[in-house]
Amino acid sequence: MSKKLKGNGLWESSRIIIPEHKEAYLKLMKDRQRRGKPELDDQEVQLIEQALIDSYNTRTAVTVTIFSPFDDTDMTGVVTSINTARREVKLFRGEDDFSWFKLEDIVSAR
């Protein structure tokens, strides 16, 4: 195999690729790894909402999975506020540590 094709050789050996082209190419490769948000059926949405309401009423911890285009995030905490007008949930994770999440960003709750 040629030295040009190993490691960073492709970029270093090419004289016509300017840094802006390299950055644009790397950004394109990262964007190709982006994934779409899964469609949840009505039953799954109801289960998520019920888990959030149970956490709010009983002050017990719930683990929610928040959608992200590259990697989902799991967060555990107690639901302390539900804003129905903005469709957001406040998850309290510890002393002075809380986050607001939109209901449509939550993929699962347990």
Image (spheres, grey):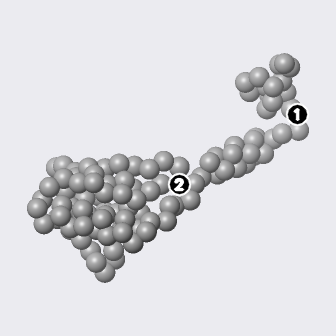
Residue type at numbered disc 2? Pro
> Can you say which quadrant of the picture contains the N terminus?
top right
Q: Is residue 90 left or right of residue 36?
A: left
Please provide percent x and percent y for residue 101: 34, 63
Q: Which quarter of the rendering shows the C terminus?
A: bottom left
Residue at the disc numbered 1? 15
The picture places residue 49, in percent across and down from the top left corner, at: 28, 68
Image vertical order of residue 52 relative to residue 23, above or below: below
The residue closer to the viewer here, 21 or 31, is 31
Q: CA distance from mark 2 to mark 1?
A: 34 Å
* Residue 69, disc: 2
Q: Are circles 2 and 1 on residues that touch, CB within 8 Å?
A: no
- Identify the residue at horizontal 64%, vertical 51% (top origin): 31
What residue is at 79 percent from the left and 32 percent from the top?
Answer: 11
* Nearest the eye: 100 or 105: 105
Residue 50, percent from left and from top: 24, 67
Residue closest to the eye, 61 or 30: 61
